[in-house]
Amino acid sequence: MTALFALATSLLWGLADFGGGLLTRRTPALTVVVVSQSIAVVVLGALVVATGGWSEAGPQLWFAVAAGLVGPVAMLAFYKALALGPMGVVSPLGSIGVAVPVGVGLMLGERPGLLQFVGILVAVAGVCLAGGPQFRGAPVQRQAIALTLLAAFGFGAVMALIAEASTTLTGLFLALFVQRVTNVAAGGLALFVSVRRGGPALPADGFPWRTLRALAFVGLADVAANGTYSIAAQHGPVTVAAVLASLYPVVTAVAARGVLRERLRAVQAAGAGLALVGTVLLASG
């Protein structure tokens, strides 16, 4: 179950990152974050009411609040990095954040078996290689890398926090709802400040109504990924769940190859292969 839900997390995060990266090429990143997460709030609010999730309220929701504060910063940095592109290079570097939940799991006493430990090393190496890597180039490329590293730490922190925010399915709906409400509040404040400083809130041609479905997909896919990761972390070692969930950059790179025709270099293809080998080792360990 851990492997299944963690791999579902990778698929959902990978597609959400691809969609978010495309949207921020025409719409300000803060607007993408606020609108997509607002749609998620509405859906999650309905789920909380329908399932009676309010009864699960407790001190553990502070973890969800913390995740909600960190999340917008990470998403904003990552979307800006993806907009600078190329996606097939930026996205894999974001997986470095897996060190945060893996470190938490090790501190809590988790000890992967030998086969799983090898799988962790192989998978992480594969994901890093899937990014190129390209650390030389113009200042814009260096800016993209700096933003990606900031996002990576934030994503890793969110993974660690959301895993502690609930212990039941209804509690998970409530935790995700609280996280997204906090996301919208923090992102909305940042957008307000940005506009006051002269930054754009919308594209030149107004609100992008034609992209509303894409915005909804990005917000809901990101929420679903947080949910599947939380379930994976609760039913198995966090060290395993976090590494398998961190394979999402491979999904983003493949989507960029299929839709944007971004060409994968040989080292990227080799990295994707190593990530797959590491996945098999982790799942069978």
Image (cartoon, rainbow, N blue to C red):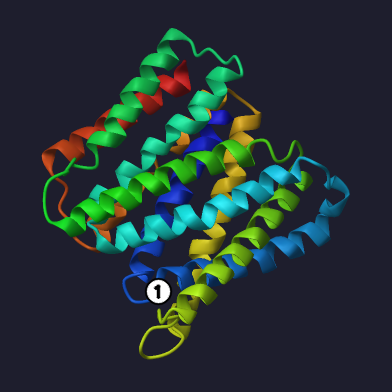
Q: Residue at x 65, y 54 (%)?
A: 179
Quadrant where the N terminus is found in the figure: top right
For residue 250, say whether it is visible.
no
Q: Residue at x 24, y 39 (%)?
A: 130
- Left or right of 85: which side holds 267? left
Q: Residue 274, relative to residue 95: is it above or below?
A: above
Residue positioned most to the top: 114
Q: Residue at x 39, y 56 (%)?
A: 77
Q: Residue 70, relative to residue 123: is it above or below?
A: below
- Left or right of 214: which side holds 261? left
Which residue in the protein does label 1 denote? 28
Q: Residue 41, relative to residue 90: is it above or below?
A: below
For residue 225, say whether it is visible.
yes
Q: Residue 57, relative to residue 34: is it above or below?
A: above
Give the x, y percent position of residue 108. 61, 19
Q: How many marks?
A: 1
Where disc 1 sits, the SS reads loop
Disc 1 crowd rating (10 Å Cα; few below 14, some 14-19, many 20+) is many
The quadrant holding residue 250 is top left
Give the x, y percent position of residue 173. 72, 51
The quadrant holding residue 84 is bottom left
Q: Amino acid at mark 1?
A: Pro
Give the x, y percent position of residue 232. 59, 34
Give the x, y percent position of residue 229. 57, 40
